[in-house]
Image (cartoon, helix red, strand yellow):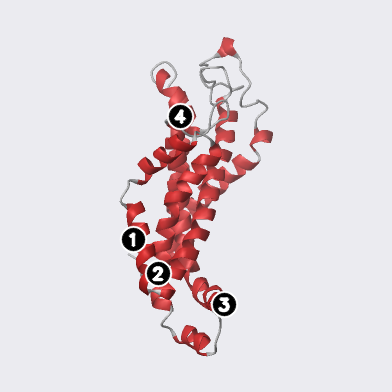
C-alpha cells in the first residue's frame, strides 16, 4: 500500500511537471495586477499571487525546477560517490584512510549551512545550487558504497577475478560496483527528497532560483508576507513540497523493504 502510494504521488508530480504547459492556459510569469491576491476560483483554481500570476501555472513550473535539481543532484552525487567509495573500500590502506578523512571533514559541517556558504560565494543560480548540493551529497553515497564493497571484495567471485589477472577497472565495474546498486537505489530515492527540500530552502533564502523563474521555495518566501490576507500563497507550495517529499520517502521505504526484507 505504501509503495503504491509513493509511486502514485511521484508519478502524478512528474506528469504534472512534464505536461504543465498544456495543463493550464496561463503563463507562469504573466502578471494581472488588478486581480493580485485573488482567491481560488473556477478560472484560477489555486488563485493568484501578489503580482497577479496564476498560482497553478507557477506551481507546475516550480515542480520542473524541483525535479530537475533532485535528479541532477542525485545523479551526479551517486556517480561520484560510487566511484570514490568503491575505490576506497576495494583498495583500503592509505587510500581508504585519506578518503575517509575527507568525508569526515565534510560531514563535520551541517550540510545546509555548507550549501548556503558555497552558494553565497558562487552566487545564487540554479547551476550553483546543484553544484553546492553535489559537493555535500556524494559523501553519503561514498560511505554506503564503501561499506558494501568491504564485504563484497572478500567474496569468491571477486577473488577469482583477481586471481585470473583481471585489471582493477574490470573488477570494479563488472563485479564489485553492480553488487551495490540495490543499496544505492534506495539511497537515491530518499536522496531525492533531501535535494528537493534543500533546493526549496536555498530558494526561500534567496540563494537559489532567481525571480521571475518559479520555484516552490521562492513562492513560499513571497507568500509569507500575506499569511493572513492570502494564505493560499504559502499553503499551496508548502503542501506541494510536503506531498512530493512524502512520496519519495514512501517510495524509498518500500524499495528498502523490497530489496532488503531484513532491514529494520
x 42%, y 15%: residue:
229
Q: Is residue 130 above or below residue 210?
A: below
Mark 4 or 3: the one toward you? 3
Q: Is residue 73 above or below residue 99?
A: above
Earlier along the polypeptide chain: callout 1 or callout 4? 1
Query: Label 1, label 4: how many angstroms apart (C-alpha)?
Result: 32 Å
Residue 33 location, quadrant: top right
Q: Is residue 260 visible?
A: no
Q: What mark, if any, has residue 101 been given in the picture? A: 1
- Specify whether 86 is left or right of 63: left
Q: Position of residue 64 (x, y in %)?
A: 58, 40
Query: Label 3, label 2: how many angstroms apart (C-alpha)?
Result: 19 Å
Q: Position of residue 223 (x, y in %)?
A: 44, 23
Residue topped by disc 2: 95
Q: Position of residue 29 (x, y in %)?
A: 61, 24
Q: Residue furthest top?
A: 34
Residue topped by disc 4: 206
Query: Label 2, label 4: how many angstroms apart (C-alpha)?
Result: 39 Å
Mark 3 Cα-neighbour bin, 10 Å: few <14, some 14–19, many ≥20:
few
Mark 4 Cα-neighbour bin, 10 Å: few <14, some 14–19, many ≥20:
some
Q: Residue furthest left?
A: 108
Tags 1 and 3 in contact by the CB under 8 Å rule? Answer: no
Residue topped by disc 3: 170
As helix, strand or loop, the secondary structure at mark 3 comes to helix
x 48%, y 56%: residue:
188
Mark 2 Cα-neighbour bin, 10 Å: few <14, some 14–19, many ≥20:
few
Earlier along the polypeptide chain: callout 1 or callout 3? 1
Amino acid at each position: 500500500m505504501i509503495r503504491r502510494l509513493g509511486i502514485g504521488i511521484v508519478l502524478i508530480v512528474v506528469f504534472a511537471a512534464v505536461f504543465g504547459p498544456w495543463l493550464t492556459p496561463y503563463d507562469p510569469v504573466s502578471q494581472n495586477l488588478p486581480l493580485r491576491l485573488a482567491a481560488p476560483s473556477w478560472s484560477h483554481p489555486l488563485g493568484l499571487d501578489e503580482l497577479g500570476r496564476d498560482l497553478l501555472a507557477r506551481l507546475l513550473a516550480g515542480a520542473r525546477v524541483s525535479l530537475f535539481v533532485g535528479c541532477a543532484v542525485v545523479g551526479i552525487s551517486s556517480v561520484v560517490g560510487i566511484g570514490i567509495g568503491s575505490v576506497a573500500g576495494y583498495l583500503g590502506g592509505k587510500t581508504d584512510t585519506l578518503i575517509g578523512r575527507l568525508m569526515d571533514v565534510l560531514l563535520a559541517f551541517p550540510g545546509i549551512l555548507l550549501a548556503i556558504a558555497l552558494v553565497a560565494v558562487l552566487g545564487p543560480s540554479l547551476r550553483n545550487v546543484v553544484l553546492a548540493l553535489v559537493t555535500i551529497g556524494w559523501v553519503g553515497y561514498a560511505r554506503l558504497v564503501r561499506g558494501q564493497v568491504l564485504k563484497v571484495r572478500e567474496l569468491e567471485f571477486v577473488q577469482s577475478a583477481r586471481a585470473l589477472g583481471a585489471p582493477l577497472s574490470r573488477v570494479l565495474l563488472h563485479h564489485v560496483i553492480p553488487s551495490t546498486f540495490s543499496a544505492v537505489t534506495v539511497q537515491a530515492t530518499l536522496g531525492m527528497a533531501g535535494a528537493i527540500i534543500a533546493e526549496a530552502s536555498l530558494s526561500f533564502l534567496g540563494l537559489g532560483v532567481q525571480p521571475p523563474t518559479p520555484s516552490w521555495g521562492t513562492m513560499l518566501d513571497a507568500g509569507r508576507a500575506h499569511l493572513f490576507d492570502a494564505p493560499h500563497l504559502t499553503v499551496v507550495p508548502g503542501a506541494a513540497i510536503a506531498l512530493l517529499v512524502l512520496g519519495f520517502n514512501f517510495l524509498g521505504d518500500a524499495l528498502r523493504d523490497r530489496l532488503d526484507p531484513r532491514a529494520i
